[in-house]
Structure formats: C-alpha cells, structure tokens
C-alpha cells in the first residue's frame, strides 16, 4: 500500500473514530449548549468527509468477472452486486 493510500485510510479511520467519540459524548453527557453545537458541527463535517471517502472508494472498487469463454474482465462494482 502506498503512503498516500495508507494516509487516506488512516484519515478515514481516525475521522470515523472521532465521529463515534462525538456521538458517544453527545449521547452520554449533559453538555452546555455551545459545546453541544460545536460538537454537532464537527460531527457534520466529519460525516461529510467520511461519506465522500466511502463514495470515492465505491467508485474505485472493481470486481473480476469470468466470461463464458473463460477469460476475465474487470467491471465496475455496483450496489446491486452485493
């Protein structure tokens, strides 16, 4: 895995972990309104980032399909295939 791909994965993973922390904190704490709003805004931005990363990953995922003649061809992954 290249450093760029590793960093992108790490960014996604750390963003998702931070988003989970924010949700847990908001669900389990009696936060002051200003802090709750700040956490909510941060969570929205993290959600957008993670959703964009997932969308990009979905577009890049390919699968190998065996054709009738025994050869293989790459096809784009689609949601209907899973």
Image (cartoon, rainbow, N blue to C red):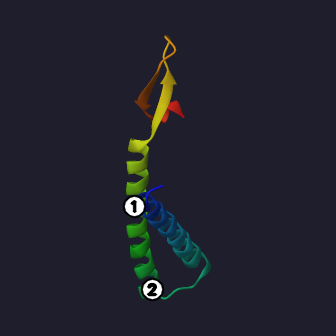
Position of residue 47 measured from the top left corner of the image (x, y, whole percent)? 43, 63
Question: Sequence-wise, which precedes: disc 2 or disc 1?
Answer: 1
- Residue ranking furthest to the right: 28
Position of residue 33 measured from the top left corner of the image (x, y, whole percent)? 45, 85
- Residue ranking furthest to the front: 2
Please state which of residues 52 and 70 is positioned toward the viewer in this rendering.
70
Please state which of residues 69 and 77 is positioned toward the viewer in this rendering.
69
Residue 55 drawn above or below residue 78 = below
Q: Which residue lies under the disc numbered 1? A: 4
SS under mark 1 = helix
Neighbour tally class for label 1: few under 14, some 14-19, many 20 plus, Cα within 10 Å:
few
Residue 53 drawn above or below residue 25 = above
- Residue ranking furthest to the top: 69
Q: Which residue is painted at 52% across and 15% down in the image?
A: 70
Q: Which mark is residue 76?
A: none
Position of residue 13 measured from the top left corner of the image (x, y, whole percent)? 51, 64
Say if mark 2 contacts mark 1, CB within 8 Å.
no
Neighbour tally class for label 2: few under 14, some 14-19, many 20 plus, Cα within 10 Å:
few
Q: Which residue is painted at 44% across and 71% down in the image?
A: 43
Q: Which residue is painted at 50% across and 11% down in the image?
A: 68
Q: CA distance from mark 2 to mark 1?
A: 34 Å
SS under mark 2 = helix
Q: Nearer the viewer, mark 2 or mark 1?
A: 1
Q: Which residue is painted at 40% across and 43% down in the image?
A: 60
Q: Which mark is residue 35?
A: 2
Where, by quadrant of the figure, is residue 28 drawn?
bottom right
Position of residue 75 measured from the top left corner of the image (x, y, whole percent)? 42, 29
């Amino acid at each position: 895995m290249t450093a760029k791909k590793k960093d992108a994965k790490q960014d996604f993973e750390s963003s998702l972990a931070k988003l989970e922390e924010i949700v847990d904190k908001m669900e389990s704490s009696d936060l002051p309104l200003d802090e709750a709003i700040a956490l909510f805004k941060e969570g929205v931005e993290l959600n957008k980032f993670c959703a964009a990363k997932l969308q990009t990953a979905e577009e890049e995922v390919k699968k190998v399909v065996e054709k009738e003649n025994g050869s293989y061809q790459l096809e784009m992954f689609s949601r209907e295939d899973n």
